[in-house]
Image (cartoon, helix red, strand yellow):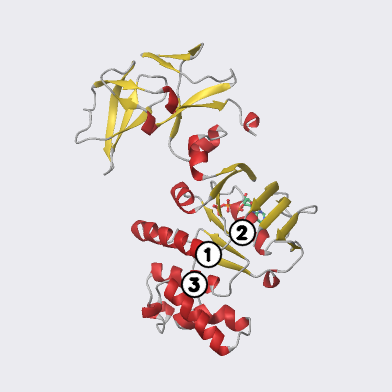
Amino acid sequence: MTLTLTNIGKTFADGTRAVRPTDLSVAEGEIVSLLGPSGCGKTTLLRMIAGLENPDAGGQIRFGDSDVTSQPVERRQVGMVFQSYALFPNMSLRANVGYGLKMQKLPRAELDARVEEVLALCRLEPYAERAVTALSGGQRQRVALARAIAPRPRVLLLDEPLSALDASLRDALRDELAELLRRFNITAIFVTHDQTEALAIADRVAVMQAGRIEQIGAPELLYRQPASRFVAEFVGDAMALEGRREGTSLQMRNGAVALPDAGAGHLPYVRAENIQISHTGPVSARVEAVTFLGTHYRVALSGLGDNMLYCTHQGDSAPRVGSEVRLAIPTAGIMMLPRSQESAR
Ligand code: ATP
């Protein structure tokens, strides 16, 4: 089922413009993540797709060829998964998963077969007869997902489904969830404020700010070619490079680096992993702090401009705090981003 939003906006009764008029097309079986800071309008957009909130006049929501804009939530056949599982505590796991199918008045044999299939795919069979109150957080969220998937929804909407789980469970369930959605070929919208989650699960990520989609694209594209400073800083760890432009070189306090070609309205940005500590590097900096993060060290560097820069460093040992290091910043690792947010759109 494809999903098409045309000119969908939301102004609440108190005047809050939660979502500016937005267009979005989601292909059949595609997973699109809405990513953005708190209050940017992600949940409101999701609730309008679900039918829990009416969009402003002039907007249209289509599922495939049918216009569902004025259809109530119960007729839209959407599946929903929330952070707070929202399971029926007095029912067994099996009864929870079968609930939507029962509402659809599916014949008993078909209902049982469908529940078995979903339980197996979600690896929940061993717990099928348990009360949901006797399950762990991760198991409960798998039940919530199974319950949403079982009625074969036209569109599946997920609102921060993993945020209540602890870090390791979240990572495991994240991969499982992506695999399940793909196996069922479900068209899904996944709301999150966690960039790693969005990049890992989605086919395309829509980065939202102040009620607008700033940029939408494949995870690699967003990361490597952010359209604005906001996207660069929100997805990954990007910092402005300070200095004086002289043609295509940037004169920093302690040396110069070569910039990619770009118009005067663009400023150089760099990600921490693209700054390398190297004896032959053209600029020097002072090591202010070193943090060990397992796979790498994160090194805070001063002296390049007014702000601290950070680089990632791999190896058995980190540079000493207080020492001077030389840095290489390869031109290919520098992103030239529009100076103003407006010009990015
Ligand atoms: P979070 O990640 O914190 O859940 P969000 O991106 O999902 O944030 P929304 O919940 O969509 O953001 O809210 C967008 C804006 O609309 C916020 O400024 C919020 O305060 C406002 N808002 C949400 N619901 C209402 C409402 N019923 N009446 C008035 N304003 C609302």
Local packing at callout 2 (Cα closer than 10 Å; few below 14, some 14-19, many 20+) is some
Asked if labels 3 and 1 touch by Cβ distance under 8 angstroms, the answer is no
Q: Earlier in the sequence, mark 2 or mark 3?
A: 2
In what element is the residue under mark 3?
helix
Q: Position of residue 27 (x, y in %)?
A: 62, 55
Say which of marks 1 and 2 sits in front. 2
Q: Position of residue 157 (x, y in %)?
A: 58, 62
Say which of marks 2 and 3 sits in front. 2
- Amino acid carrying mark 1 in the image: Phe
Residue that mark 2 sits on: 28
Q: In the shown orientation, is residue 96 left or right of residue 9?
A: left
Q: CA distance from mark 1 to mark 2?
A: 22 Å
Residue 204's disc is none
Residue that mark 1 sits on: 82
Asked if labels 2 and 1 touch by Cβ distance under 8 angstroms, the answer is no
- Amino acid carrying mark 2 in the image: Glu
- Amino acid carrying mark 3 in the image: Ala
Q: Residue furthest bottom?
A: 108
Q: CA distance from mark 1 to mark 3?
A: 13 Å
Residue 146's disc is 3
